[in-house]
Image (spheres, rainbow, N blue to C red):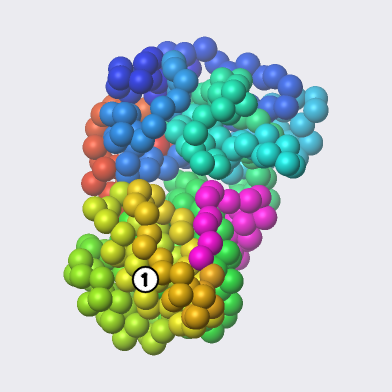
Amino acid sequence: MKAWQMMTLDSGLRLADVPEPRLRGGGATLDVLAAMIPAYTGQLVAGGRGGFPTPIVLGPCAIGRVSETADDVFAVRPGDIVAANAMFRSNRTDDSQEVLLGWTGIGGDGRPTPTTDRMREVWRDGLFAERGLQPERTLVALPGAQDYPEPERLAFLQWLVIAGEGIDRAGVRPGHTVGIVGATGQLGSAAVLVALARGASAVVAVGRNRATLDRLAAVDPRVLTVPLSGDRAVDARAIRAAAGPLDAVVDTLGMVPGPDPTMAGYDAIRTDGTLVLVGGVRHELPIPYHDLMHRRLTVRGSWMSGDSTVREIWSAIRHGVLDLSVLDVTVVGLADPAAALSAAADAHGLHIVVLVP
C-alpha cells in the first residue's frame, strides 16, 4: 500500500510502498478515510518536536472504517466508522503511562521510559496511509457516521475533542463567559467552537491573526475578539473589557516567545475562576502564590482526551449542535507529501488541510 514514511529522524517524509498492515491481538485494521495534517507537521518532520522510533508511517489521528478486528476486540466491529485518536495508555492504575502512536508525544513529564519505548515499538505506525493497524484502546466507534456526507470535515474531530476536554476541565456551563487564548490556531479555533456548543454566553477569542479573529467573530455573535498586543497588562485589560472578568480561560497557544499572553489570560479571570492549559507553551508561568490563593483560582492541565469526550463531540456534530460547515477544508492526496506539509503550514484557524488517501 501507499503511505508517508520516515526511514530515520533526519530522512524527511516520503511517499513509500510499504507492507499491508497485519492484524494481531488487541488490534483492528482500518481503511483510512480522512486524516487532518496538523499545521506543525513540517516542524515535526524537521526534528523540532521530539523523536519517535523509525522507520515509521506517520499520522496520529484519522477517521477510518474498520476492515477487520482481532478475536479479542469488542469495542469496534468491521464496518464501523471510527475515530482513531492515537492516545495509547498502559492502563496501570498506579503509574499509567501514555504515548501518541505514529507521532511524537509522551504523557507525564514527557521523558521516555522502557515502558513507553516498548509501547511505541509494538504499535509503531500511524495513519498517513491507505490503511492502518491500531490498538482497540485508541479507537472510538462513531454511530451514524457512515451517513455523514463529508468525512474530510470530520477529520477536524481530533482537534475538537482535545479542545473539548479542556473546556470540560474548565467546568464550562451554559451562561459562562470563556476566554480562549491562542484562538487563531487550529486548536484554539476548535475551542471556540466547542465553547459555543457548550452554551457559553460569551467567548473571548484572543490571538494575533486579525483576519482569523474576524472569521471567528462571523461564526456567532457571542464571539468577541481581542488582538494580542504583546503587552501583558494591556492585553489583560482588553480581555477583561470584552465580557467582564471571565469564568474560565483555556490557553491553547503553541510555541511562543514568552509566557505573557498566557498570563494576560490568567489576569482576566474572575475570583473563583479557572485556567486550563492545553497548548504547547514551553515557558514557566510566573503565577504568584498570594494571588492564586486570595482569588481562589484553579489552574489545571489537559492533554489529549478521553473516549467520553469523543462520543459527546461526535453527538454534537451529528445532531447539528456543532456545525462543521464553518471549516475551510483543503483536501490533499498521498502523491506529494512535501506540498501537503507546505499547505498545512499555511493553514490556521478554521482552515485545515486533510489527507484523503
- From the viewer's perspective, is residue 354 above or below residue 246? above
> Who's the residue at 55% across and 42% down the image?
108
| Image location of residue 57, percent across then percent down | 45, 23
**Considering depth in this image, is 261 or 308 the residue closer to the camera?**
261
Q: Is residue 212 left or right of residue 75?
A: left
| Image location of residue 40, percent across then percent down | 32, 41
Does dot 1 land on a helix, a strand or a loop? Answer: helix
Based on the picture, tell me whether residue 174 belongs to the magenta stretch. Answer: no
Q: Is residue 16 left or right of residue 271?
A: left
> Who's the residue at 63% across and 51% down the image?
306
- From the viewer's perspective, is residue 268 above or below residue 153? below
Q: Quadrant of residue 169?
A: bottom right
Does residue 30 appear in this view? yes
Q: Is residue 285 left or right of residue 257?
A: right
All told, the count of numbered labels is: 1
**Considering depth in this image, is 260 or 331 the residue closer to the camera?**
260
Q: Residues within 10 Å of mark 1 (few under 14, many from 20)?
A: many
Quadrant of the frame with the C terminus: top left
Q: Amino acid at mark 1?
A: Gly
| Image location of residue 103, percent across then percent down | 46, 32
**Which residue ends up furthest to the front in the rendered image?**
290
> Who's the residue at 50% across and 48% down the image?
158
> Who's the residue at 37% across and 71% down the image?
265
Q: Is residue 272 left or right of residue 268?
A: right
| Image location of residue 354, percent across then percent down | 39, 42
**Considering depth in this image, is 340 or 58 the residue closer to the camera?**
58
Q: Which residues are magenta?
A: 299-326
Based on the picture, tell me whether residue 304 belongs to the magenta stretch. Answer: yes
Residue, disc 1: 265
Q: Quadrant of residue 73?
A: top right
